[in-house]
Amino acid sequence: MSILHDLAATIEARKGADPESSWTAKLLAKGPEKCAEKFGEEAVEAIIEAVKNDKDGLTAEAADVLYHLLVMLAARDVALDDVLEELARRQGLSGIAEKAARPKS
């Protein structure tokens, strides 16, 4: 198991926990929309650190982004393994070809 799998399992375990007992439980209790909003905030903070060329800041914010991505996925019952399978499916494909093959919305 990877650290991401361990973290995803911990987040999943917090779904039914008392919101006063953990930050993850509190965030999940606020609903999927709030989880998505928090992910977006963290992504913007990571972008700012990247633009500033602050390697340490970007490292810390990237960790926050990964955590909040996993919380957002858990809030919508999307398993980390499903995301990893999608990445594996795309591996070896040209990004341009993969995007062109997506169903048009």
Image: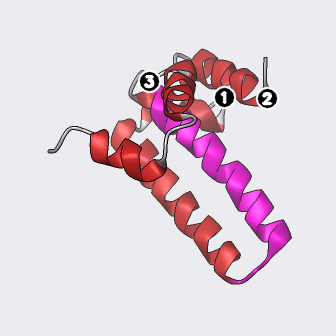
Q: Distance between the residues labelled 3 and 2?
A: 18 Å
Corner quadrant of residue 68: top right
Distance in Å between CA atoms under marks 1 and 3: 24 Å
> Hey, what amino acid is under mark 3?
Val
Residue, disc 1 = 21
Residue at image location 49% in from the left, 34% down from the top: 90
Q: Is residue 53 above or below residue 10?
A: below
Q: Position of residue 53 (x, y in %)?
A: 76, 80
Amino acid type, residue under disc 1 in the picture: Ser
The stretch of residues the image draws in magenta is 52-74
Q: Would you name the residue on which mark 2 appears? A: 3
Front-most of 29 and 3?
Answer: 3
Task: Evaluate if marks 1 and 3 touch, with contact meaning CB atoms under 8 Å apart.
Answer: no
In this rendering, the label closer to the viewer, 1 or 3: 3
Which label's residue is closer to the chain start, 1 or 3?
A: 1
Q: Which residue is drawn at 68% across and 21% down?
A: 10
Residue 80 x %, y %: 56, 24
